[in-house]
Structure formats: C-alpha cells, structure tokens
Amino acid sequence: MTPSDPPPSPERLPKHVVLIPDGNGRWATANGKPVVEGHRQGAKAVEGFLRVCRDWHVPYATIWGFSTENWGRRRVEVEAIMHLVELSLRRNRANFGRDGVRFRHLGRRDRIAAQYPRLAKLISRLEKDTANNSPFTLNLALDYGGRNEVVRALQSLMAGGAAPDELTWDAIAAHLDTAGQPDPDLVIRSSGEHRLSGILPLQSVYAEIVFLPQFLPDLSEDDFREALREFAHRERRFGGRPGMTGGEFRGN
C-alpha cells in the first residue's frame, strides 16, 4: 500500500480507536536524548495519529496520556508530561471548534486538580466548551487506570442506592468514563510491548489489537494508516463462529 491508496470502506473501519503511546523513554535512551525530548517527539506522533483518525472519519479516539501508576516516575518526568499535555491542549484549543472535536477526560480528576490546578481548569473548560462539537470525539486518559475506573463506577452506582439485581452491564456502562460512547474496536500499542496494561478493560473485551514494534516517536502517519488497514481485513466474530458477526452475543 502507498499513502495515495484510498482508505478501506467506512464500514470496515473502527468507530473507536485507542492508542497506548509507549516507548518515549526508550527512544530517548536509544538516541542519546533526555526523556523529556522523547515525550516531545512522542506528542508529535500522537498528533499524526489523530490526523489520520480525522482524515479517515474514525469518530472516536482515545489517547492514554498518563496512568494511575505513572505518578511513581521521577518528578521531573511527571512535570514534563503534564506540561506537554497542557501545552498541546492550549495550542489546539482553537482547532477543536474549527474541526468539530469534542474533548473528554477519562480518569481520576482529584489528584490533577490538587497538583496541577491550571491544567485541571483547562480540561474542565475544554469539556464544557466542546460538549456539542461533532463529528470527532477525543478522549484523553489522564491519571487513568482500568481497575480504578471500575471501582469508581461501582462506587457511583452504590452511592445512588443501586440494588444487587440492578448491577447490569448497561447500568455499569452508564457509570464508566466512556458512558455514551461506542466500545473500542481497535487498540494500538507502540514499542513492541504485548500487553494492554488495563486500558478500558470492560469496554475493550472484543477490541482487536495491533502491536507496533516501533517506539512511539518513530511512528509515522503511514504506520497508523497501516494499523487501520490491518483492522479492516480482520474478521470480527464476537464469540461466534467464522462467517458470523456474533453481534448478538455482545454485552451478555
């Protein structure tokens, strides 16, 4: 395939793609650069990924920017990541309206508000200002952990007085961070690591997975296009047999 080749037909493309952007630190080490530079170059690759999603009319994209476990990294690296997130959001703020981007934050909010109040206020403002934008939704998973999301959803249900027989999948899904969105169809992870690390664990049970060997900063838009093409050629059965869509089994 070449960059000029047309994309697969819309019905073969995912509706929701998750990117686990991994390998910034290892890229920096391999290239004799500080870790902060690895994150800067990784942020550029993420922007390329989002351009591909918008150009190919993938309506939902989730970027895992910072996990609940990432607080254990050196303070200077955490500061750099949060600074880059804020810088990127401010730089693209005006484009969200022009491009019809709805911004959503996935994950805990309390620790970011306590330690990075300016970023927290920016996130809240962007969510409010873009709430009615379409056709593209950008989820930023920041201070996100899959187990934590499940715990928060169940705590919310119990606080609302839900009885045991009311703990259905639909009820739980309505209290997840992605409430109202389609489940991920495709998860892409860079750097050659073959694990999901807890990204959207309940929502991604039937997602296809593409593991890319390159570190995130080395990925081009063509690499992301190829990942979408690979998805388009897969047969999804959702628990059914070959030749069946299996859609009737989802959510059971």
Image: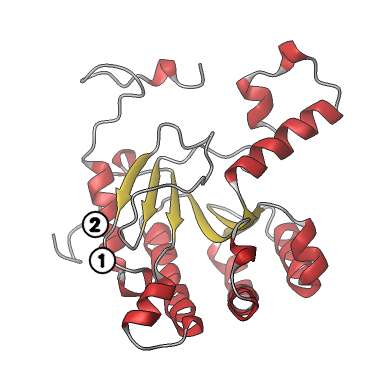
Q: Which mark is residue 226?
A: 2
Residue type pointed to by label 1: Asp
Nearer-the-camera pick, 158 or 12: 158
The secondary structure type at the circle numbered 1 is helix
**In the displayed structure image, the side of residue 88 where residue 44 appears, left or right:** left
The secondary structure type at the circle numbered 2 is helix
Q: Look at the image and tell me whether residue 8 can be seen.
A: no
Q: Count how many numbered circles sit on residues in the image.
A: 2
Picture layout, residue 129 above or below residue 230: below
The quadrant in which residue 154 appears is top right
Q: Position of residue 229 (x, y in %)?
A: 24, 50
Q: Residue at horizontal 78%, vertical 33%?
A: 155
**In the displayed structure image, the side of residue 135 where residue 143 appears, left or right:** right
Q: Position of residue 205 (x, y in %)?
A: 45, 32
Q: Residue at horizontal 44%, vertical 68%?
A: 46
Nearer-the-camera pick, 105 or 159: 159
The quadrant in which residue 4 appears is bottom left
Residue type pointed to by label 2: Glu
- Residue behind mark 1: 222
CA neighbours of label 2 inside 10 A, class few (<14), some (14 to 19), many (20+): some
CA neighbours of label 1 inside 10 A, class few (<14), some (14 to 19), many (20+): some
Q: Position of residue 147 (x, y in %)?
A: 61, 41
Q: Residue at horizontal 35%, vertical 56%?
A: 56
The quadrant in which the N terminus is found is bottom left
The quadrant in which residue 74 appears is bottom right
Q: Look at the image and tell me whether residue 4 can be seen.
A: yes
**Label 1 near label 2: C-beta < 8 Å?**
yes
Q: CA distance from mark 2 to mark 1?
A: 6 Å
Nearer-the-camera pick, 25 or 45: 25
Picture layout, residue 54 above or below residue 59: below
